[in-house]
């Protein structure tokens, strides 16, 4: 009786301890599962191992951008270039030959030479900034051929053109003239440039061939590389910097899902800027906003490419960024330098 009594006295305590243990255990199991599910949903291409390893190069692969500046404007030189230099970013400057040195609002050849010395990219934006779709064959040839020669005469080998007003991407005569003189052209508007030209919702093309199988001009190709017009939002929001900044951040992060999926830079935003001034006029970005944007790129590990880093593969008909592959090389280099460091130690 004494023994029975002691067991029945102890039993309630034992059962409470066991129950508490079971509840705690089950809660932990469920919580761990929920965290795993959340991680997998948040990063569809990364495994838990990759996440815990903290893959640094992923951020470079996922985030790339090209910054372009049109029309050889002095305000770019005075107000944007110092900010680019501050963050070590290189821009691509599309120069209209007959604008250079024209008046106080334009850069001089000396300004452009300083840009080149600092490592910025100098490319062609025609002779007189006319809508190429509206020109005679002779004038079209002059605008594209002569601007290449003009830049060459000043010591610049331009391999890329930007069409004025982003017009001409749907005109086979313009595309033919671009192809005659240049390797690539920025031409037309879109939020992102897909380097394999394969993600356009209104196009079935699977590469960047200039002509489709039936001989018609494709929507996107090496001579109609799309750009994102910053000034569209400058004009829309009239220096409401928060609103424009939010559009910019959203636009430049759109690439991530494509780049994570392909594990390389397969989509890139190409931003088009014009004037920089803190008082509003059309086609003007404030210097303060530009500083915010460049800081965002810097803080978030974006890699800024010059337009001339873009290459075209004639076998695949894909555009590609050799710099995008450098992030793999960097990873190998990191391991190599780590091994060297081990040996040296
Ligand atoms: Zn222009």
Image: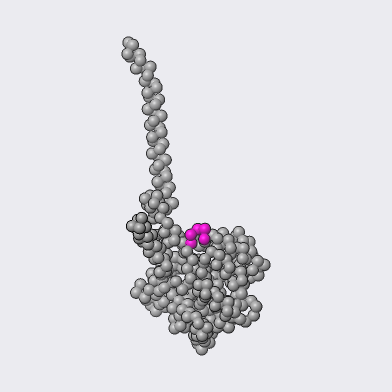
Our reading of the magenta stretch's main secondary structure is loop
Residue 148 vertical position relative to residue 19 in the rendered view, above or below = below
* 186 displayed left or right of 107: left
- Indicate whether residue 301 is drawn in magenta: yes
Residue 111 vertical position relative to residue 261 in the rendered view, above or below = below
- Indicate whether residue 275 is drawn in magenta: no
Residue drawn at x 38%, y 34% as measured from the top left? 25
Percent across and percent down for residue 215 are 39, 79
Front-most of 32 and 86?
86
Percent across and percent down for residue 322 are 40, 69
- Numbered circles on residues, count: 0
For residue 180, what is the image quadrant? bottom left
Extreme residue in the top direction? 1
Residue drawn at x 36%, y 55% as measured from the top left? 345
Residue drawn at x 55%, y 65% as measured from the top left? 86
Extreme residue in the bottom direction? 138
Percent across and percent down for residue 303 are 47, 64
Residue 6 vertical position relative to residue 41 in the rendered view, above or below = above
Quadrant where the N terminus is found in the figure: top left
Tell me which colouring the rendered structure shows. one colour
Front-most of 195 and 307?
307
Residue drawn at x 46%, y 73% as measured from the top left? 308
Does residue 206 show up? yes
Q: Which residues are magenta?
A: 298-302
* 82 displayed left or right of 52: right
Does residue 223 show up? no
């Amino acid at each position: 009786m004494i023994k029975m009594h002691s067991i029945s006295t102890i039993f309630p305590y034992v059962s409470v301890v066991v129950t508490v243990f079971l509840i705690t255990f089950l809660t932990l199991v469920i919580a761990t599962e929920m965290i795993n599910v959340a991680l997998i949903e948040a990063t569809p291409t990364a495994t838990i191992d990759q996440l815990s390893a903290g893959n640094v190069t992923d951020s470079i692969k996922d985030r790339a951008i090209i910054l372009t500046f049109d029309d050889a404007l002095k305000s770019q030189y005075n107000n944007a270039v110092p900010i680019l230099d501050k963050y070590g970013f290189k821009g691509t400057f599309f120069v209209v030959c007959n604008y250079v040195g024209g008046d106080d609002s334009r850069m001089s050849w000396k300004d452009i030479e300083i840009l080149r010395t600092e490592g910025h990219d100098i490319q062609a934006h025609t002779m007189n900034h006319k809508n190429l779709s509206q020109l005679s064959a002779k004038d079209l040839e002059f605008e594209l051929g002569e601007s290449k020669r003009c830049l060459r005469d000043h010591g610049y080998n331009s391999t890329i053109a930007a069409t004025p007003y982003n017009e001409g991407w749907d005109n086979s005569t313009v595309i033919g003239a671009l192809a005659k003189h240049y390797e690539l052209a920025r031409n037309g508007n879109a939020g992102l440039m897909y380097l394999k030209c394969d993600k356009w919702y209104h196009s079935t093309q699977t590469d960047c061939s200039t002509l489709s199988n039936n001989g018609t001009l494709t929507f996107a190709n090496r001579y109609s590389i799309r750009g994102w017009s910053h000034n569209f939002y400058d004009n829309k929001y009239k220096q409401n910097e928060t609103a424009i900044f939010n559009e910019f951040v959203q636009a430049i992060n759109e690439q991530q899902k494509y780049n994570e999926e392909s594990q390389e830079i397969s989509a890139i935003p190409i931003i088009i800027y014009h004037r920089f001034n803190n008082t509003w006029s059309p086609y003007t970005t404030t210097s303060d906003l530009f500083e915010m944007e460049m800081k965002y790129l810097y803080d978030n590990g974006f890699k800024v490419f010059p337009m001339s880093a873009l290459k075209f593969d004639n076998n695949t008909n894909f555009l590609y960024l050799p710099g995008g592959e450098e992030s793999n090389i960097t990873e190998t280099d990191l391991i190599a330098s780590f091994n060297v460091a081990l040996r040296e130690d």
